[in-house]
Each structure stands twice: as C-alpha cells, then as structure tokens.
Image (cartoon, rainbow, N blue to C red):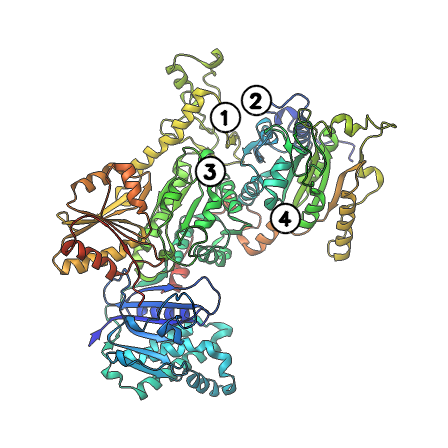
Amino acid sequence: MQKNRLSWMIGGPQGSGINASAEVFAKACSRAGLRVYANIEYHSNIMGKHSFYRVRVSDEDLRSYQEKIDILVALDLETLVGDADHRRWPTHYGHLHEIDRGGGVIYDSEIGFEPPADRSDIRFFPVPFIEVIRTALEEVGKGDQARRYEILKNTVALGATLALCEYPFDIVADVILSQFKGKRSEIGQLNVRAAKLAFDYVRDHFDCAAFPYRLQPNPERKPRILAKGYEIIALAKLRAGCAFQTYYPISPATDESVFLERHQREQSLLVVQCEDEISSINMAVGAAHMGVRSATATSGPGFALMVEGIGFAAMTEAPGPVITMYQRGGPSTGLPTRQEQGDLRFVLHPAQGDFPHVVIAPGDLRECYQDVFSAFNWAEQFQLPVIVLPDKKLAAIYTTIDRLELTYDKVERGKIFTGSEWTPYAAKGNDLVEQDGHLPGGKKPGEGVNEYLRYALSDDGVSPRSRPGTPGGRFWSTTDEHDPDGHITEGVEMRTAMMRKRMGKLDLISRTVPKDQQYELHGPADADLTVVAWGSTKGTILDAMLALAEDGKKVSFLQCRLMRPFPAEDVERILRSAKRLVLVEENYSGQLGAVIAEETGVRIEDRVLKYDGRPFSEDEIVAALRERFAGRPEPHTEAVMTHVR
Amino acid sequence: MSVEAPVKRFTLKDYKSDLHNDWCPGCGDFGILTGIQLALQQMDLDPDKVAVFSGIGCSGKTPHYVKAYGFHTLHGRVLPTATGARLANSGVTVIALGGDGDGYGIGAGYFVNSGRRNVDMAYLVHNNSVYGLTKGQASPTLRKGKRTKSMPEEAIQDGINPIAMAVAAGYTFIARGYALEPKHLAGIIVKAIEHKGAALVDVLQTCPTYNDLYTKEWYDGADLPDKRSRLYKLDDTGYDGVVHDVTDEKEIVAKKAQAVVKSYEREPIPIGVYYQAELPTYEDMLRQRIPALDGKPLVDIDVFHRDVNALLEAMR
C-alpha cells in the first residue's frame, strides 16, 4: 500500500477540460494539507490536440515530476496509445507505457480501448462517462442533453479517481462549489453530482480496497497556497507597486497580463494591450520616465521585437521597465507552448552597443516572487531595464507554497530630485575635464548656480531622477549620446564619461544585490560532483540530489541566478574548487556554460542537455548523475530526450 | 475673442531653450518649433507641466529647443512612448512629434493604433516628403513619379494620404498646417492640444537642402501665372469639419467622408482643421474601469500598499 504518494495524470483533447479536473484535484489535495506539484503539457492549438496534466501529490515538499504514473485518466484513446495511427510523423505514443506496475487506468468505456495483454501488471477501470453524465442530468430533468454536457467528463474522471484512492469526497465537492459561485452555482451542483455518481460507480463496480494507492488528508495542515508561477509573478508586481503593465498576447506570457487585467479595477493597475511588442516596451519606457513603476511581459518572439526598447531604456537611464521574459522553445516561432531555457544569451545581449541592464533567472516560485519584487527596486535604484527570466515551466507549474514565503516587502525607490537638491558642481562633468588638463572652450560653469542636471556625473553612475511635472526638475533626454543636460553630444570627453557613468552601474549592482540572490551553492561542501544549472531546473535537481543522497552519493548544486552583472569571481572560485562539474541545461548549446566560460574562463566539458521542448524529469537527472558516478568517467555531452515509447 | 486678454505668466522666451540650433538655415523645422512655442505661450502652459516627445530625424531634435520636459526617443516609436507617459501622468501636457518617415513609415503601426486608442494627446508630423538626416531619400508621403534632387531615381512607390489614413484610424482631431505660417500653425496646435482625444496635425514643411520640389516658392505659387498660393485656409471657405452631435452616427460618417474628400484636393491644398469629434477618450474609458483614476493621475495613486489578501485567499 502506497499512502499519500501519488503520480496522477489526466489526458485528453485540448478543450476537454482536463485543466479543470487536474486543478480541482490539486486544490482538494492542497487544502487537505498535502503537497502538490502539477504540470501541464499542451499543443499550440485551441481544440482537439492531445494535452495532459500531471499532478504529483505527497506529504513532503515536491519540486519536480517523475516519469512513472500511478493513475492515468484517459478521456480519449489517443491518451492511451498515441497518434501513430493517424499521423505520418507521430508526436507521441500515448501514456499507457508510463504507468507503473500496480497502477491503474481509468478510461471512458466508449472510446473503444481494449486492455493489451502485455500490461497485465496494471488494472483497468472502464467507466461509462456519458451514462454517468446522463444520470446526473436526468436528476435535473435534462437527461436527453448528455452530449451537450460532454465537458462534465473531466468531473467524472475526478470522481472516479477519488473513489479509487478512497479520498474523502466532501473536500472535492467544496472545491468544485467554490469555483462556481453566484449564477453558476447550479452548474457547480451539477458538477458535484456527476463527480459523486462517478465516485459511487467506481466504488460499486471495482474492488477499490485492493488498489494499492491511498490518499488521506494530512492531519498537520499548514496554511499553504497553491499557485502557478505567473500568478506569483503577478502578485509580486502588485506588491511591488507596479502601476502600469503593457503586453501583446503571446504564449506562455499572456496569462500573467490577463491575470493583472482581471484585477486592475480593485488594484488600480493600468494594463494596456498593445498593437505589438515594440509598442509594449516603448509605452512601458515612457511610463517609467514619468515616475510610475512599469512593466511588460513577453516571450522570445515578442522580446525579439522589444530589443531596441531595452537599449532605449538603458541609454536614457529610465527607471524601468521590468520585463518578465518567459522562455519557450525556439528558435523563431519554435515550440510556442513548450519548455526551453534557450534565451539566456539573447537577453544578455539584446541590442546594439554596450549598455547596462540586469538579468535575473529565478529557480522556483518563491524566487519568482523575490526577483520580480527586487526587479522594481533595482530598476529605480539603478535606472535601467531589468529582465526577469522565467520560462514556460515556471509559468505553468501549479504547486504548493508556504504562505509565509511571500513576505519579502521592502520598497526602494532610489535617488529622486524633489525640487531643491541641486546638482553638485563636480557632477557637471568638470572634474573629469580638469583631470585631463583642459576645459572645453575655456569655460567653467559658475559654482552656486541652482541647477538640476538629469544626467549629472555622479560617483556611482546614478544621478537623481526627476518626475516630469516637478518644478525645477526639467530635463531633456535622448537616445543619442548626451551631456548632463540630456542634450546630444558627440564630444570625446563627454562620450567617455557617459559610457563610464552608465557601465559603472554594473559594479554598483554587484555590490548591492545580496549574494544569496546572485547564486547559491546547494548541498554538501565536500561533494564529489557539482551540478551547475540555472532557472527552473532547480527543483528537479534538488529532488534528484535527494535520490543520489540515498545512494550515498555526495552531490552539490551551483545555482546561477543573477546573470547580469554575473558574479564571476565567486562562481569561478566555486567551480575551481569543485571535484567534478556537470552542466545541466534545457537548451542545445549549453548557454550558461558559454556565459561561465566567457566570465570565468572555466569550461565545463561534462554536459547534460535537453532540448525536446519538455522539462527534465527527476528520473532523467538521477540517471544522468548516476551514470557519472558509475559509468563513463570522461566528460561528455549527453543529449537527453523525453522517454516516448 | 475676449477684448481683455488675461495676464500671462509666461513669455515666449520661457519656452526657448538656450541650446545652439543645428538645423539647416531656412529649415521648415524652425517654423514648426516657433508654432509649438507660440501655442504653449498662448495657452500659458507651465513649462514644468509640459513634456515634448519626438522620434528620430531632424524633427527629433525639436524637444531640445523647447524649454519643457523633453524626450527624444526612438525612430518611429514616439507615439507608444508618449502614450505610456501620458497614461502614467495625465497632469502633464504631452505633445508628440516626428517626421513623416518616422510616423507614416517605420511608425505606421503606431500611427494607426494611436488613432483607434484615442489617447488625449497631440501628435505633430513634420511632413517634407524626404528623409532629411540621411540626406534626402523619399519618404512615405512622396508621390509616385516624383524625384527630388537628392534622389537617384524617381519614386516608384506611391505616397500615402495621412489625413485619409487618420480618418480611417479613428483620430478625433485631424488638421493640416504649414510650417512657414507659424502663427496659423500655432492656432491649430492650440486646438489640437485643447482637443480631448488623439489629435493629428500634419504639417507641410519645406526641406531647403534636399527637397527642391516642394519649396517655399512652390507653396507660394511663384511659378504659377497668377502667382496664386498652392495653399488655402479651410477657415476662409466656411468649411466645418466639426461633428456637432457626436451621438449622431450619420453626422460622424458624413464629416469623415467630407474630410477624406478634402484630403484629396491638390493645388491648392487645404490647411486647417479637417475633422473633429469629441468622443470618449481612452482615459475616459480607463476612469470607468479604474475608479482610482478619477481626478488623479496614475503616478499619484499609492499602489505601494496593495492588499492582496483576497487574491491569496483565492489561491488556497
């Protein structure tokens, strides 16, 4: 008997409601004190193509998915056997082969599935989905409309699952009802009824007690929330005082903006849907210059249009915007709804010339919150654009987080001119000129003149910003090279001084950002092997480390998070003192490896790379690491592909 | 017109920056700059409460010569940038401007979408039919078959009709001025700024260095037998471009059609207000959607202490 450790999957055509089913199930587990890690895979398609949602449940914290499934719920035949029968180039072979020994399949008895002889190690639970729906509808006098209510199949699937795991039905009923409020409460009731009938059907027709998986509420319930990455990022934007968000629809970034749009009324947040990403970024830059905290959200193809705006913001020292750049499979349109860590090098060098900006890649939902919150502070403290680099996986994973982890809260707005802090004489650029031994045109601006200069040459590169409308704070600003007034210049001294002013901010950022937000070395100090990785693989690697620890293997993990400015010295020290290094990335070329080589001179030759558009499973990382302990000792590049047959 | 003009706080000098101007002698940009400064002075706007945004090109330098907040942005992106600024702080008068290449070529998408958005903002286009700063290539308003002295061959792409495009895009104030008549232009700019909604002012402009077709003499009609100007003022003809009853869809369509027909008149070219309708602005819609914006610019709303407990509760 396996209690409170379950890997459940529902599969069906896009549009069949598997999201609702999986998310209600996840919520019902989370509310009962269980930990949940759920992830969805879907096609870039509105209706019809195969999608699946995996929900992993446990008493312990979960940070990744496993390949083996304990219970598979199939709304169609393709979920079981794949699409090889009707596609010239099959995209998958179904999930039947992924079911663990002793596991089970709940499927619609209408789909024409015959349990194969070679899977006598698992149990099959055919359920007459439409019959159950018809019975529920008959009770409200709509028995003849069962085909119109096919969407209820996802609820039937849920009810059947609960019976099999002997999970208390009431918890689920509450969750369902809480999703259908007001006018829709009747539909909620219908859903509960359909689920209950399915629950009863399975309990009455199958020997549930013999099925070896149990789910029971955890008596030590903690106040947790169950959220997706984009929701946490949106929350961080709200908490950080973001007043202005622009966007152009693009997967997988749109959800964040739509979430914010939904709450703009009560949260006083202006969300503008733009005509394209060029408009999005420039509107956000314009708003940032006016003194509001502004942001935008996009994915690779949209970011490709935004790049000139990044240079614009950096050159004019705009206090923002904050850009959440959700990576997806590239290149070009690539894999719109799939996972890849393929845009690191792109966001590090997005536009022409040398300019400062910040890039940070959070590794989990807690870090998404912290990094997005910090991003708004940094944008204003350092007056530059800040890119936060999550990905499809972080956007879409649905997982439990301790509520207390969302308390990071300090707003820093940087240097602001309020009307009387005149620019000091030295900051007008004269000390630089004097060092070089001459004055331009023999002129020397008089001391004691009350004057505000937006681009004054301050020691740390940051000059006080003025909010347009502030009396005496008038300034000019240009994307051309400029002088402290903000007027165009092509003079050599001023050009040199301004480049140093802007680029010098990178040192200031390195000194200001807390070390533990720049990188983190997880695991034992005396590890025999050190994994080097970044972003959303964090949880998978941490889970794999636990498995390796059970083998008695000492593995540590260097998580790189602040990508620009890169903590080169510290990273180099850690890398040079490690016994053996393995780079783990979800891209073709090992982009972090390239950044590390550029910044530290350390080349990591042992690499585990995956670029099939799916995130690493825990099993894949465990296998790759075990191989390094047991198998080939020499460094090599290993391309991992999701197990499809 | 009132007989007693109210005492003004600001003189023309208060809108002039002391930066050395590097436009070519005789550039039409001087007339547009003067038109802007005259308009600001007529409206007695506090220079600290005005922000001028520009694109890239000769016209892009205009904000540097105006004493106000000045933003010299990217080529073609002045409208989104100015829109973001305007929406962030409605307490500041935002004026956007740029060249014809900037607005009708590389920025054409923003030109169209700013019309349908109807943000309360004036947009001035310096229309001289050439790309001046890159030495005189054809701009999107140069007509097919024309060739300025700076072009190796005649244009084989046709010019667009910005007035007709603005009508179709949804601008609620559409006018045309002439750079070398800065006082008349200033009057139009005042109306454009005062208009509640997206206002396009297409300004016919000479480029003495590269455009030898549309010169001051050409506009003056110096080559015509009767020396008749190639421009005439709509105001002098009794033309009425204003929609008087904005609830009357028929009147709106009729006034739009009238503006489009006018926009195809050539030699003489009409200048003045082609079309105006006071329709709900983007900001009006936002105020309905976000109650806190009523009477308060976004930048002044305290959004640093948001209560997200209800959102967190929904995630339980």
Q: Quadrant of the C terminus of chain A?
A: bottom left
- What residue is shown with label 3? A313
Q: Quadrant of the N terminus of chain A?
A: bottom left
The CA span between labels 4 and 2 is: 34 Å
- What residue is shown with label 4? B118
Image: A331 above or below A40? above
The CA span between labels 1 and 2 is: 10 Å
Whether callout 1 and callout 3 share a subunit is answered yes
Q: Nearer the viewer, mark 2 or mark 3?
A: 3
The image position of residue B86, as x and y in percent, is 57, 42
Q: Nearer the viewer, mark 1 or mark 3?
A: 3
SS of the residue under disc 4: loop
The CA span between labels 1 and 4 is: 33 Å
What's the chain of the residue with tag 4?
B
Residue A458 sits in which quadrant? top left
- What residue is shown with label 2? B19
Instruction: Give me the disc on residue A473.
Output: none
- What residue is shown with label 1? A485
Q: Please, what is the three-letter code of the amino acid marked with disc 4? A: Asn
The image position of residue A642, as x and y in percent, is 31, 61
